[in-house]
Amino acid sequence: MSAQDYLSAISGIYKSFGITLPLNPGAEDAEIHQVQTKFGDDLNLATLLDLWRTANGSDSYTPVFLNPGILTGYDLLSIDESLAQHDGMRARAPQYEGYEDPEPRDPRIASGWWQPGWLPFAEFGGSTMLLLLDLTPEGTGRKGQVIPYTHDPDEMTWVAESLSDFFKASAEEFEKEGEELLEDLRED
């Protein structure tokens, strides 16, 4: 599923409940260039860059994504917010030296608390939960897979082989859970 198709589907679900999905205007070329400078011209970034070209973030506490099986709506981070989250995790990483997951980690995800190729694109609860585009997978993982980070206990899990696959799963979850998720956002 493309970024544009995904946002159109989610906007349609919002509209069916009488709500407008508040997305920021798309990113400028200079903002896209910031991501490319930091992560290269990796083809696995293309779908995320397309998403940001369409909408460079959303209002806070606006569910744009759902992690299948978890009724938690994630906001879309802007490029600046994403890069700040990435840099913040890098800065905190030394205090997690020797970190081990509370449960065995999925073998598709690299070990450790932080990897330079983990790019946050969505958050919940002031970043206590993040969705990350994984550009540094391990084992049988695929570059461009989507992994959620959850704080307390800190853990990384696996959710989708690609951002396109994640969009499809998230849209299906919105179809099932939209009413419960969006009921407090209805415009009266």
Image: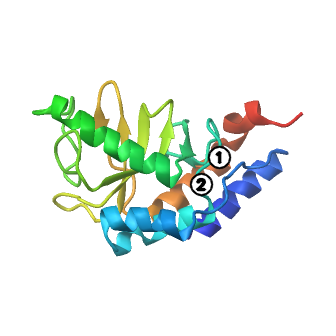
Residue 69 in sight in this render: no
- Circle 1: element type: helix
Per the image, the residue denoted by label 1 is 176
Amino acid at pointer 2: Glu
> In this orientation, does residue 8 appear?
yes
Question: Viewed as shown, does residue 48 lie left or right of 57?
Answer: left
* Mark 2 nearby-residue class (10 Å; few <14, some 14–19, many ≥20): some
The answer to whether the residue labelled 1 contacts the one labelled 2, judged by CB atoms less than 8 Å apart, is: yes
Seen at 34% across and 66% down, the residue is 37
Across and down, in percent, residue 167 comes to 53, 59
Identity of the residue drawn at 39% across and 42% down: 85
Q: Nearer the viewer, residue 32 or 97?
A: 32
Q: Crowdedness of circle 1 by 10 Å Cα count: few (<14), some, many (20+)?
A: few
User: Would you place residue 51 above or below residue 89 in this image?
Assistant: below
Residue 95 spot, x, y in % from top left: 18, 29
130 above or below 135? above
* CA–CA distance in space, label 1 to label 2: 7 Å
Quadrant of residue 145 within the rendered picture: bottom left
Q: Which mark is residue 121?
A: none
Task: Indicate the amino acid at tag 1.
Answer: Lys
Name of the residue lying farthest toward the left: 98
Residue at horizontal 40 percent and vertical 62 percent from the top: 35
In the visual, does 187 lie left or right of 7?
Answer: right
Give the residue number, with chain letter if any, for mark 2: 172
Residue 5: x and y, percent?
63, 68
Left or right: 170, with 119 as reference point: right
